[in-house]
Amino acid sequence: MGVKPPPKTTAQERLKQLSDQVVGGLKQLYKDHIKPVEALYKFGEFHSPMLEDSDFDAPPMVLMLGQYSVGKTSFIRYLLERDFPGQRIGPEPTTDRFVAVMNGKAEKVTPGNAAAMDSARPFRALNRFGSGFLSKFEVSQCPSPILKDIYFVDTPGVLSGEKQRIGRSYDFAALIEWFATRADRILLLFDAHKLDISDEFRRSIEMLKGHDDKIRVVLNKSDRVSNQQLMRVYGAMMWSLGKVVRSPEVLRVYISSFWDKPYADVGASNKDLFDKERNDLLADLRSLPRNSAVRKINELIKRSRLCKVHALLVSHLKSKMPSLWGHGKAQKKILDNIVEEFRVVQRKHALSPGDFPNVNRFKQIITQGAYELNKFPVLKPKLIEAMDHVLSVDVPALLKQMPILDSMETQAKVSASKLNPFGTNSGPAPQSGFAVGDAKKAEYMNIFYTLESSGGKASGAACQTAMVNRAGGLFDNSILGQIWELSDIDKDGCLDQDEFSVAMYLIDQAKNGEMPPAALPDNLIPPNKRVKQTW
């Protein structure tokens, strides 16, 4: 018998393999050269805990943050297109716990204490927050195509007044900081009818400092206000955010209504705006798995720089301590003059001020943790040199593989174009003058909503039956194949609402004797698709 050849891998599978290879190399660099420095100088006790394999292997995380009843849980349900175990939706503060919504073969809820002990999940570091928090944390699992690529963390609504500080048995702001450090995207949700930013919400947003590139703002329930009111609401929200988020860049704001109900009558005139904003946000979330490897490299670089500064800082403070006695008095004097000591370390090692920790927080941790500066280890130059080698040589070598990933992604998209359920055939000469009106699109959407879909897209198999039924047997699969090639604009083997409308329109035209064009005319390309094609 001959040796059976190995199965051919698709472009998508090769892309996944190379991405895993990059993440694996990153994981090894951390274990060999960065983690030892963190352990020696107690970096995890001053910043975030040391990373584990599950932190590298976990899919991208989307953190939901906002005051109560702004639609965080409804947003997750809208994306999943289904209920998930343990969900609580209502106008009052219903979500009273942190819920990680992840993929699973069966529906189940894992309590926080059990989830934090599971080495396969990226939550073991949450043990540091104690049972007071873990009793208010759970992992909700359900089968979902979206959750194979990303997962969501739903948070309790931010309360107002002393209830936030006294009513919770854990440090809410510290937990937000922990999740924000590991998140790939942070969604700040606002209700168009409830724009006030309480002191507690302000403190939570301030804990996101340093993660500005991850933040996206969602002005939810925008269909419940008129055009004039929406303009004023948007301006008021940006004014409020400008006082909290100290960033020269303007935050990206998505204006829409994210749930499974139709837009309210008062927002009907803004339907196109809401649809485009919704599609833009979904496209942003869809890009997270593709950019996951790059994000992990970026986070490790950031962490390594902070760790290096921490090691240089504590070893410098140790060198200022007397060798025999008088440690308490000397430590108090050093902490009273801590700002000047920061400056000395910065000038001595030519470090960036942005890599230094917050002075007051650093001093507070040393004082409250009863750390003795004389017991910190002396500076070990070889360990610091090894970290510098990682940042200057090893990480750039990994980054050189990114263009390969980009090239493979392009190949994957080309391969996806072969997922046409009708096969590929050439079409006749191009025609023009096609356009899908609102009335027709509404008719087509009634069909689209009956199809099984995921993330707002219906697969080729789901669309095939609808297209064949629409054709009514008046032409064969070769014509439907041409229509599919034209309609699947982004070549991902699926159709979203706009692409499905184009497919239905072209079928109706073919039934009237107008055969599909060789190329899709501009007035049949949805505006958001035109932008993507140009880019």
Image: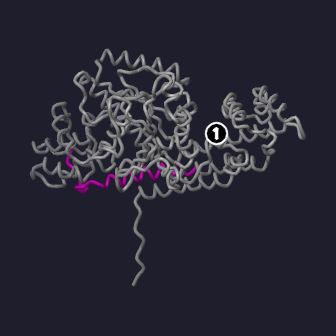
Q: Residue at x 65, y 51 (%)?
A: 394
Q: Quadrant of residue 476?
A: bottom left
Q: Percent from the top left, x then y, of residue 115?
A: 48, 50
Residue 404 covered by magenta stretch: yes
Taking the image as shown, residue 258 lies to the left or right of residue 438, namely right
Residue 405 covered by magenta stretch: yes
Q: Percent from the top left, x then y, of residue 117?
A: 52, 53
What element does badge 1 sit on?
loop
- The residue at which mark 1 appears reads as 47
Of residue 335 and residue 421, the one placed in the foreground of this image is: 335
Q: Main secondary structure of the magenta part?
A: helix
Of residue 325 and residue 353, the one placed in the foreground of this image is: 325
Q: Percent from the top left, x then y, of residue 7?
A: 40, 68
* Residue type pointed to by label 1: His
Of residue 151 and residue 461, the one placed in the foreground of this image is: 151
Taking the image as shown, residue 70 lies to the left or right of residue 206, namely left
Q: Residue at x 35, y 46 (%)?
A: 85
Taking the image as shown, residue 327 lies to the left or right of residue 245, namely right
Residues in magenta? 400-429
> Is residue 482 visible in this depiction of the protein?
yes
